Amino acid sequence: MVSICYEVTSKGLFKKIQLCDVWYKGMPKIKHKDLPDFMDGNCCFLSKGILRSKDPCWEYENEIRLIAKDGMESPFIDLEPKAIIVGIKDSPEWAVFSAVSNQFNIPFGYLENRPDGMPGYVVKSEKSFFDYLTK
């Protein structure tokens, strides 16, 4: 698991992106017969749940995803990452994203089990992780 956090403030940016609620119904159901419609542009991949679906156990996150609008020239959006969060400490993604974080001075955090024993995780960090939110 890797999450890259952004702060969206530019009004012009909203012409290029869409904010999508995540569906917590499990993996999307795509059939072989759906592929021609995707290829011809007759079916929006978001409407089928691609990039929007997660297993029900993650519903407590109440996540919203920022996705380039269909029909944009590029799927890449010119935004500066504000934070990187990986799965548990020492997960396979840890070393790569920690190095990226250090090189570009992006706050870096990881997930840890909740201290109260309830289901879910909290974000921990070795640096002041969400300081940018209080500026």
Image (spheres, helix red, strand yellow):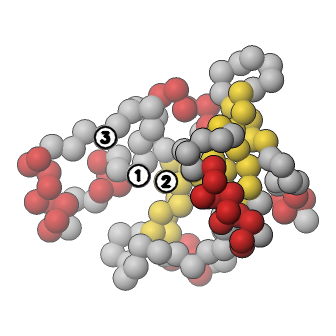
Dot 2: what SS?
Answer: strand
Identify the residue at horizontal 35%, vertical 46% (top origin): 49
Q: How far apart are marks 3 and 1 (CA)?
A: 9 Å
Say the numbered circle drawn on residue 28: 3
Relative to 126, say whether 56 is above or below.
above
Of labels 2 and 1, earlier in sequence is 2
Q: Where is residue 80 in the image (x, y as percent from the top left)?
A: 66, 73
The amino acid on which the numbered mark 3 sits, given as a three-letter code, is: Pro
Q: What element carries label 3?
A: loop
In three-dimensional space, the C-alpha distance between marks 2 and 1, rounded to whole angstroms, equals: 9 Å
Rendered position, 115 above or below 78: above
Question: Disc 2 marks which residue?
Answer: 20
Residue assigned mark 1: 51
Q: Which amino acid does label 1 sit on?
A: Leu
Q: Nearer the viewer, residue 101 or 14?
A: 101
Between marks 2 and 3, how big is the CA–CA gap? 15 Å
Q: Given contact means CB atoms under 8 Å apart, are the residues at marks 2 and 1 in contact? A: yes
Which disc is residue 80 wearing? none
